[in-house]
Image (tube, helix red, strand yellow):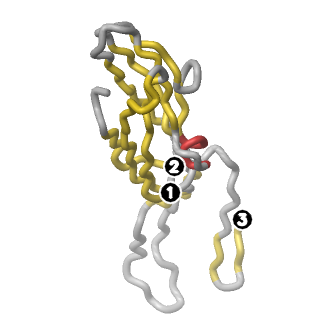
Amino acid sequence: VAQRHINFGTVLAKNDYAKKLIIKNLSDVPLMYEIVKNNNWVSSAFMNFEGMEGMGVVKPHGQHEKDFVFTPKISGKFHEVLRIKNLQDPENQVEVTVKALVRKRNTFSLLPSSLDFGRCINGERTRMCRIEVRNETSSSRTVTIRHGSLTLK
């Protein structure tokens, strides 16, 4: 394996991130391999390999690039170990650590981040300020604005 560690860095949940896993064969015979994920739901739900799910053949003294997609669905630290097994010699395997720090996506944004109404005098109106609320997801959202007993949706 060309790399023992794959670090995606800081990523956002519910986005797709693609990488290549480079598998090299240094022997004189073809390498039949299988990529084995941990037996937990995180590995199976978040990492997907293209083609036959994590299997392949590398010709002698050749290399194979295996595409995979990382799609985190929850936020937090992601740390999983993949095992690349030689199917002709199951004791011969290599471990690859996959890491990421997954951040939750913003669901909305509010602009501006601060409001300045200018000088406030009791009984008089202040100058008007414009507020923009933007939905950052594909899901529909209901925004409720409350001021005293007044409620706007």
Q: Amino acid at mark 2?
A: Ala
Crowdedness near tag 2: few (<14), some (14–19) or many (≥20) residues, C-alpha within 10 Å: some
Q: Amino acid at mark 3?
A: Lys
Q: Residues within 10 Å of mark 3 (few under 14, many from 20)?
A: few
Give the mark nearest the N terminus, 1 or 3.
1
- Disc 3 is placed on an element classified as loop
x, y percentage for residue 6?
Answer: 34, 39
Mark 2 or mark 1: name the one nearer the start of the chain. Answer: 2
Determine the image quadrant of residue 1. Answer: top left
Residue at screen point 49% across, 17% down: 56
**Residue occupying image coordinates x 38% and y 15%:** 64
Instruction: Please tell me which of labels 2 and 3 falls first in the chain.
Output: 2
Q: Toward the viewer: 11 or 126?
A: 11
In this view, the residue in front, 84 or 100, is: 84
Q: Position of residue 77 (x, y in %)?
A: 43, 57
The residue that disc 3 covers is 153
Foreground mark, 1 or 3, reads 1
Task: Identify residue for label 2.
Answer: 13
Closer to the camera: disc 2 or disc 3? 2
Label 2 residue SS: loop
Dot 2 and dot 1 residues touching (CB under 8 Å):
yes
C-alpha gap between disc 2 and disc 3:
28 Å
State the residue in front, 118 or 123.
Answer: 118
> Percent from the top left, x then y, of residue 58?
40, 12
Q: Is residue 132 above or below residue 8?
A: below
Q: Residues within 10 Å of mark 1 (few under 14, many from 20)?
A: some
* Residue at point 43%, 24% (across, down): 89
Residue type at the position of mark 1: Ser
Which secondary structure lies at badge 1?
loop
Is 57 left or right of 148, judged from the image as shown?
left
